[in-house]
Image (tube, helix red, strand yellow):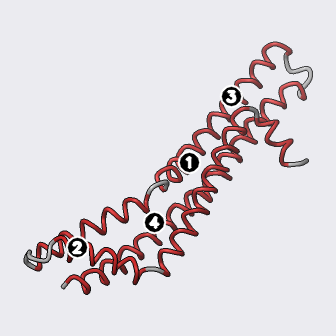
Amino acid sequence: MRVIDYIHQGGVIMYILLALNIVGLAIMLTKFIIFAKEKKMTEQISDDLGKRVRDDYESKDSNSIIEVAKQELQTYISNMERGLNTVKIIASISPLLGLLGTVLGVLIAFRVMSQTGLNNPSSFAQGISMALITTVGGMIVAIPHYIGHNYLIGMLDNLETTLEKKIIKKVL
């Protein structure tokens, strides 16, 4: 059986999961590329942020300059973080959508059984099939997004630590 057949059997829930998967994977791929580029440019970024802090706050004491540098860095990192919450949300709701599909599939199976009886087991197999497919679909979407989100957060934390060390050296 082809993947598109499984998606079609899973119904609307599987199409929603497919759309979420595409969006999440696009965000993760984009963030991986951006973070890799930013990691290579840490020297230039720290120069830019350090220069901005030194130019604006050169008459302040060193503690104030360090605080301002950290604020500048936090602003930069929060801009870099944009989109990661979407990946986290996709990782969180995908299993719930799979569970919703499971409940709907079982509901359909019971409805068919109540209308036709147990004479023809294949008549309610479609609902059971939908239940199982959506459960698997929810997990297939959630697991890579959960792993990707954690990996991206780790990359961002490493970038932040590296930049913080370099900026503090430049402003003092």
Image coordinates of residue 143 in percent, x first then y, are: 61, 57
Q: Quadrant of the C terminus?
A: bottom left
- Identify the image quadrant of residue 167: bottom left
* Three-letter code, disc 3: Leu
Query: According to the image, label 1 marks what residue?
Result: 90
> Mark 3 or 2, which is nearer the eye?
2
The answer for how far apart the CA atoms under marks 3 and 1 are is 20 Å
Query: According to the image, label 2 marks what residue?
Result: 53
Q: Which mark is residue 42?
A: none
Question: Which numbered disc, 1 or 2, marks the residue that appears first in the sequence?
Answer: 2
- Identify the image quadrant of residue 48: bottom left
Image coordinates of residue 132 in percent, x first then y, are: 74, 41
> Mark 4 or 2, which is nearer the eye?
2
* Three-letter code, disc 4: Ile
Q: Which mark is residue 153?
A: 4
* Three-letter code, disc 2: Val
Image coordinates of residue 11 in percent, x first then y, are: 76, 33
* Three-letter code, disc 1: Ile
The answer for how far apart the CA atoms under marks 1 and 2 are is 37 Å
Q: Secondary structure at mark 3?
A: helix
The answer to whether the residues at label 4 and label 2 have Cβ atoms under 8 Å apart is no
Above or below for 38 versus 140:
below
Q: Secondary structure at mark 1?
A: helix
The answer for how far apart the CA atoms under marks 3 and 2 are is 57 Å
Q: Which mark is residue 104?
A: 3
Mark 1, Cα crowd under 10 Å, few <14 / some 14-19 / many 20+, is many
The answer to whether the residues at label 1 and label 2 have Cβ atoms under 8 Å apart is no
Question: Which numbered disc, 3 or 4, marks the residue that appears first in the sequence?
Answer: 3
| Residue drawn at the location 83% of the way across and 31% of the way down | 126
| Residue drawn at the location 65% of the way across and 51% of the way down | 141
Mark 3, Cα crowd under 10 Å, few <14 / some 14-19 / many 20+, is some
> Mark 1 or 2, which is nearer the eye?
2
